[in-house]
Image: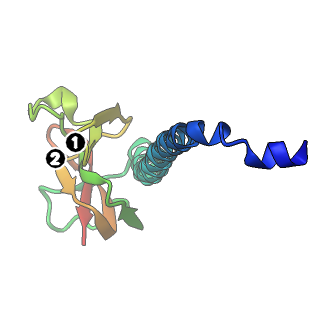
Amino acid sequence: MLRRFLNDERAIEGMPMRIMVTVVLFAVILGITGKAASDFIGDVKEKKLMDELDRIEKRASVMYTAGGGRDIKNPDDLSGTMESIHVKIPDNAAYVVFGGMPDGAADARTDNVYYYVLNNGRVQAKSSIARFSGPAVFYPGEYEMTLELIRNNSGTYVEIRGI
């Protein structure tokens, strides 16, 4: 019986097909895993970007609600609130804008909007309590941002400058 088992070669005919099916399944599983890992890394980077932007927005909102802006028409006015924060914008963002709309419309009602555009073209816009002095655009990298509360005839704004 053992001799007959060792000499039986019928099972060898199906081996190439089994190997091919195994290789194809392994390739599909590996591809799906790679795509999932790529999406996960992208989500982590976007979360870091949102955390940085939320930190800027919260500081600007607190500053705006506290009041006490510097009068930009009066050069002798040294009062006002100013704050510096260190921010790192991740490389998955194409750019970030505070005080403007994604379509580029400059409207008095859009000065409290901020948004980011990712490298894949996705746009995410949010609004803030704070009104920003004008569109401030930032690209990926590290910045030492200065937030200053200013006022003029048309109202109080948070001006954002990045170095």
x, y percentage for residue 90? 36, 60
The residue wearing badge 2 is: 134
x, y percentage for residue 134? 16, 46
Q: Nearer the viewer, residue 85 or 151?
A: 85
Mark 2 burial class by Cα count in 10 Å: few <14, some 14-19, many 20+: some
x, y percentage for residue 92? 32, 54
Q: Residue furthest left?
A: 105
User: Which residue appears at 50% of the width and 49% of the height?
Assistant: 37
Mark 1 burial class by Cα count in 10 Å: few <14, some 14-19, many 20+: many
Q: Regarding mark 1 in the picture, which secondary structure is present there?
A: loop
The residue wearing badge 1 is: 99
In the displayed structure, 127 sits above or below 63; it is above
Within the image, what quadrant is residue 87 found in?
Answer: bottom left
Colouring of the image: rainbow
The span from disc 2 to disc 1 (Cα, nearest Å) is: 5 Å
Identify the amino acid type marked 1. Gly
Which mark is first along the chain, 1 or 2? Answer: 1
In the rendered structure, the answer to whether residue 15 lies left or right of residue 119 reads right
Identify the amino acid type marked 2. Gly
**Can the viewer see residue 84?**
no
User: Which residue appears at 62% of the width and 43% of the height?
Assistant: 12
Q: How many marks?
A: 2
Quarter the N terminus occupies: top right
Q: Residue furthest top?
A: 109
Quarter the C terminus occupies: bottom left
Within the image, what quadrant is residue 103 found in?
Answer: top left
Labels 2 and 1 touching (C-beta < 8 A): yes
